[in-house]
Image: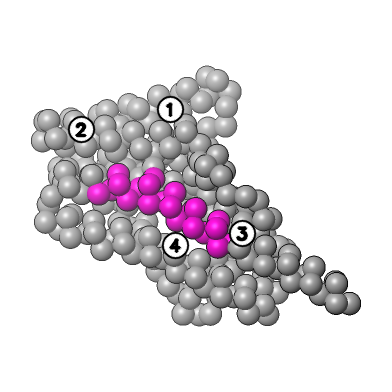
C-alpha cells in the first residue's frame, strides 16, 4: 500500500493512490498493539492481516502502480490518472456486489480521488503523489509532538486498549517500550519525507513513484513486524515477572 492509504487506515496504510482511520487504536496499529500485548506469536499471516490482507494490499498498491506504468509510457498526467481512477471505482463496486465490507475500498477510492484531483488541477504528474506528503507530515508531527509532550502516541494506544489512558505511564518499562515504538513509527514517516520530498522538488516523477511503492507496503510491513516483536517481548517479560512474584509470595 502506498503511504497515504496505509495511514488513513490507522497507520490500515497501509496508498500510491496514497494510507482508514487515523486514530491510533484503529487499523494496523490497533491490531499490532493488541497482538503484541496479548503475547500472540508473530506470524506472516498476522502481519498480513494487520496491513489489510491481500485484497487490502492490492487495492492500495495497484492504483499507484498503474499510474506509474502508464505515466512512464505516455508522460501524460491526464491519461495516467484514468487507470487508477477506474480501478478504485471497480474495487468499490466489486465489494458492494459481493456484499462485503467496503470501508477500505471507499477509503482507497477517496485517496485516489484526491490524488487524481491534485494531478488534474496542476497538470503535473508528480502531484499525483502530493497528498501523501501531507499525510506523512501530519503523522510525523503528531508522533513528534506526543514524544516531546511525554505522551508517546503508542503509549496512548496501549492505554486505550487496556482501558486506562494513564496507568501505562506509571510503568517505567512500558513507557520505554511506548517511546521506542513511537520512534519507530516516526522514523518510517520521516524517512519517507526525507527520501521522497527531494524527488518531488526535482520533478523526478518516475523515481518518486518507485520510491513511494518501495516505501509503502514493504516498509510499513516491517514497521508493523518490529512493533509486534517489541510489544511481544514486553508481554513475555511481564508474564515472567508476574510468575516470579507469585512464586516468591
Cα distance, mark 4 to mark 2? Answer: 29 Å
Do callouts 4 and 1 mark residues in contact (Cβ within 8 Å)? no
Q: Nearer the viewer, mark 3 or mark 2?
A: 3
Where 146 sits versus 114, above or below? below
Quadrant where the C terminus sits is bottom right
Name the residue furthest top: 97
Q: Residue at x 34, y 33 (%)?
A: 62
Q: Nearer the viewer, residue 203 or 218?
A: 218
- Tag shown at residue 69: 2
Magenta span of residues: 211-232
Q: Residue at x 30, y 44 (%)?
A: 213
Residue 8's spot in the image, x, y percent? Answer: 45, 49
From the image, tell me which residue sits under label 4. 185
From the image, tell me which residue sits under label 3. 232
Cα distance, mark 3 to mark 1? Answer: 35 Å
Cα distance, mark 4 to mark 1? Answer: 29 Å
Q: Residue at x 41, y 65 (%)?
A: 186
Q: Nearer the viewer, mark 2 or mark 1?
A: 2
Is residue 16 in the magenta section? Answer: no
Left-right relation of 132 to 180:
left
Mark 4 or mark 1: name the one nearer the start of the chain. Answer: 1
Do callouts 2 and 1 mark residues in contact (Cβ within 8 Å)? no
Mark 2 or mark 1: name the one nearer the start of the chain. Answer: 2
Is residue 231 in the magenta section? Answer: yes
Amino acid at each position: 500500500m502506498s503511504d497515504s492509504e496505509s495511514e488513513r487506515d490507522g497507520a490500515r496504510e497501509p496508498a500510491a493512490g496514497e494510507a482508514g482511520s487515523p486514530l491510533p487504536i484503529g487499523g494496523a496499529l490497533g491490531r499490532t498493539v493488541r497482538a503484541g500485548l496479548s503475547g500472540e506469536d508473530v506470524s506472516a499471516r498476522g502481519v498480513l492481516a494487520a496491513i489489510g490482507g491481500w485484497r487490502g494490499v492490492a487495492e492500495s498498491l495497484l492504483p499507484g502502480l498503474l499510474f506509474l506504468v502508464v505515466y512512464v509510457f505516455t508522460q501524460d498526467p491526464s491519461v495516467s490518472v484514468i487507470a487508477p481512477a477506474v480501478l478504485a471505482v471497480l474495487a468499490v463496486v466489486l465489494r458492494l456486489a459481493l456484499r462485503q465490507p467496503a470501508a477500505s475500498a471507499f477509503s482507497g477510492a477517496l485517496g485516489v480521488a484526491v490524488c487524481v484531483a491534485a494531478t488534474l488541477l496542476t497538470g503535473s504528474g508528480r502531484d499525483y503523489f502530493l497528498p501523501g506528503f501531507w499525510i506523512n507530515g501530519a503523522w510525523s508531527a503528531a508522533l513528534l509532538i506526543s514524544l516531546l509532550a511525554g505522551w508517546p502516541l503508542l503509549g496512548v494506544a496501549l492505554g486505550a486498549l487496556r482501558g486506562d489512558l494513564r496507568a501505562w505511564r506509571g510503568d517505567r518499562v512500558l513507557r520505554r517500550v511506548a517511546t521506542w515504538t513511537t520512534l519507530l513509527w516516526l522514523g518510517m514517516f520521516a524517512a519517507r519525507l526525507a527520501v521522497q520530498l527531494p524527488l518531488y522538488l526535482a520533478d523526478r516523477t518516475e523515481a518518486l513513484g518507485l520510491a513511494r511503492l518501495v516505501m509503502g507496503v514493504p516498509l510499513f510491513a516491517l514497521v508493523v513486524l518490529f512493533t509486534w516483536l517489541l510489544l511481544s517481548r514486553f508481554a513475555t517479560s511481564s508474564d515472567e515477572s508476574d510468575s516470579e512474584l507469585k512464586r516468591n509470595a
